[in-house]
Amino acid sequence: MNIGSRRTPPPRPTGRTGTRSFRSAPQQSFLERNRGRLLWGVAGLAVLAMAGIAFVNATSPAYACSSEWNPPLPASPAPGATPRLGIVQTDTGQQHVAVGSFVKYALCPPATGKHNNATGEGPIKAGVYGPDDQALPQGWLHNLEHGGLVLLYRCSSGDTACTDTGQAALRQFNASFPNSPICNRPAGSIGPVVARFDQMKWPYAALIWGVVLPLNSLDTAQITAFFEQQGERTNPEALCAKPTATPGPTGTPPPSAAASATPSVAPTVAPTVAPTPAPTASPTPGAS
């Protein structure tokens, strides 16, 4: 053995037996590497889209008005005649629409027109709705259709209905409202609905189906008289039978034709014949 000499390592086998093959891992695609991040991103975009839709729906108007109705005032009644309260508005139908549908009304405030037909959405609950409460015409028009009264108030500059005092007066009006004039339905069943509505020419307006009573102040006596006079008479969906006209008095019937055709004949009485007196002899003339 030679000291300092190096041992030559044995040669490696040249065959495949006992060897390991080293292969590099396959490269992943971009989608495979970022699948989780992409899924979270899509979910986030969906949430943002739904939030955007909800925001648009919340901020978009639920209805619009072609014009604010400004009819001429009715003529004064004849002396001694009972005035007919309210002004008739053109009937625009009574079509039911889905909740959330946008509606454009030809005249505002509308006394007829498209409205909702769903529990809680139309007819809506009777009562006083404050300035910040939502009470859409699509809801309270269905109350009018069933014979209820709606009292609208405006909150423009200078109007007093939205003050604390004005709201208290509206609640007092609602609390003292009478039963309906024909069906005798108690207040609170279908009306009154007291709600804010700014798209009108007057501070207040009382409505029944197809008729509007414009008001410059909260005249509760006139509103009550309006409802007593015309309530439950114009609405197309009545909740009870409407009164029928009272028939006029019946005259005395004329005699029957048979009776009038047979004349009454009085009995014939034979005339009484007086006896003819005997002729009186002429006097004999005297001798000359």
Image (cartoon, rainbow, N blue to C red):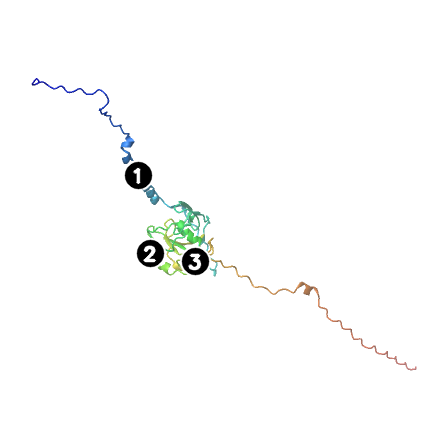
Left or right position of 87 against 279 = left
Distance CA(mark 3)–CA(mark 1):
56 Å
Tag of residue 99:
none
Judged from this view, the residue extending furthest toward the right is 288
- Tell which circle, 2 or 3, labels the residue nearer the N-terminal end: 2
Distance CA(mark 2)–CA(mark 1):
47 Å
> Which element type, helix, strand or loop, lies under badge 2?
helix
Tag of residue 43:
1
Residue 236 position (above or below residue 54): below
Are discs 3 and 1 less than 8 Å apart at CB?
A: no
What's the amino acid at mark 3?
Answer: Phe
Q: Which of 132 and 96 is in front in this view?
A: 96
Residue 208 appears anywhere in the view: no
Q: How crowded is mark 2: few (under 14 residues within 10 Å), some or many (20 or more)?
A: some
- Tell which circle, 2 or 1, labels the residue nearer the N-terminal end: 1
The residue sitting at 28% across, 36% down in the picture is 36
Q: Mark 3 points at which residue?
A: 227
Q: Mark 2 points at which residue?
A: 167
Residue 80 position (above or below residue 276): above
> Which element type, helix, strand or loop, lies under badge 1?
helix
Are discs 2 and 1 less than 8 Å apart at CB?
A: no
Are discs 2 and 3 less than 8 Å apart at CB?
A: no
Q: Which of 101 and 119 is in front in this view?
A: 119
Q: Position of residue 153 (x, y in %)?
A: 36, 53
Distance CA(mark 2)–CA(mark 3):
21 Å
